[in-house]
Image (cartoon, coloured by chain):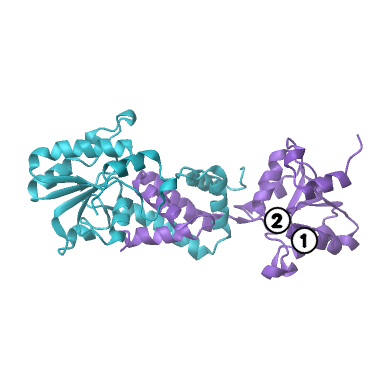
Chain colours: A purple, B cyan
Amino acid sequence: MEYGSETLASLVKQFARMPGVGLKTAQRLALYLLRSKPEDVERLGTLVLELKDKVGFCQVCGSITEDEKCAICKDTSRNTETICVVEQPQDVLVLEKTGEYRGLYHVLHGVLSPIDGVGPDNINLAALEERVRKDKVKEVIIATNPSVEGDTTALYIAKALESGGCTVTRLARGLPVGGSLEFADEVTLARAIERREKL
Amino acid sequence: MEYGSETLASLVKQFARMPGVGLKTAQRLALYLLRSKPEDVERLGTLVLELKDKVGFCQVCGSITEDEKCAICKDTSRNTETICVVEQPQDVLVLEKTGEYRGLYHVLHGVLSPIDGVGPDNINLAALEERVRKDKVKEVIIATNPSVEGDTTALYIAKALESGGCTVTRLARGLPVGGSLEFADEVTLARAIERREKL
């Protein structure tokens, strides 16, 4: 009865389970809903329930969709000979925003991380190998994060696809556009010198 | 179709309306739910809908409750001659945690703020005056925040209750316990000197 209502207390607890939401924030959110217009609260509750029932992942690439296949996989104007491999569904959104890429995607839903017990069977990898084999893919662009796990995963995928006859590339590392040398970390800077491009 | 799902896009928008939640955070929360166990997501959605239907405010004091009267107003062991006036329902929770106070509460659901167009009629004030008149209240402790609006509201309430024959007090201002002089702001420090207590 800490909050004067079991429902409110449970809602605070449920909010607090979400990433980056502490108990104070959870309480603030729940109390905000209590003061909100009933139709807004109903809309939020309904959407959360609908999310569970309607939204899932594309059976081909693992992107977010409400159907079996996502909009990108269904789009016949996309270049089916290139697959861009990303860690999470939100990475697809970011890459699509650049407008630079016209190929397909493959979402791993994770990265290899032996410390956390995540091996090749725990991420969406077997499906990628099958797609590359079946769909005459010419290039696989690996766009995992530039982190230790992302790099490990990239190397693992490159090795696994070696015999398939397709080119495997990785997003370029270097200075971020609009950044300044002064604030670049040494590793990035060293990499930028090493991989310098001819003008 | 930015998110590959209308439902997901709407949920992100709805999350982003909550205080302190930006678009990036809203997206993170929605994608977290997408990866969560279905039963957890269902629980959250159901709780949000239940909040709207079941949880409201006490008809006497304005605290959070699922009934007509809140647990504190119903508790016959509480001292009914004292009313502590607070701005928001969460302030009741904080004060209850101290275990120091055994009287009743009154939640204003706001503070006087002429700039924002909040006058005496826009907060839960008339009900307080009626309670004081009817229930033989001996002391009203004003526990609005130590801010300009909180102080204004406190003065207004003191004036409004003047003729009622009850004592009106305000929470003490001074140095926070466990704090150090070095980090106290000047206004607080000046107040602490002015209101110094005899040892």
For disc 2, the neighbor class at 10 Å (few under 14, some 14 to 19, many from 20) is many
Q: Is residue A152 visible?
A: yes
Same subunit, tags 1 and 2: yes
Q: Chain of mark 2?
A: A
**What residue is shown with label 1?**
A153
**Residue drawn at (40%, 58%) of the image:** A11
Q: Is residue A195 left or right of residue A13?
A: right
**Residue drawn at (55%, 48%) of the image:** B25
| Residue type indicated by callout 2 | Glu
Q: Earlier in the sequence, mark 1 or mark 2?
A: 2
**What residue is shown with label 2?**
A87
Residue A153: percent from the left, percent from the top? 77, 61
Q: Observer-nearest residue: B114 or B156?
A: B156
Q: How many marks?
A: 2
How far apart are the two marked residues, 1 and 2, measured between alpha carbons?
A: 9 Å
The answer to whether the residue labelled 1 contacts the one labelled 2, judged by CB atoms less than 8 Å apart, is yes
Q: Quadrant of residue B102?
A: bottom left
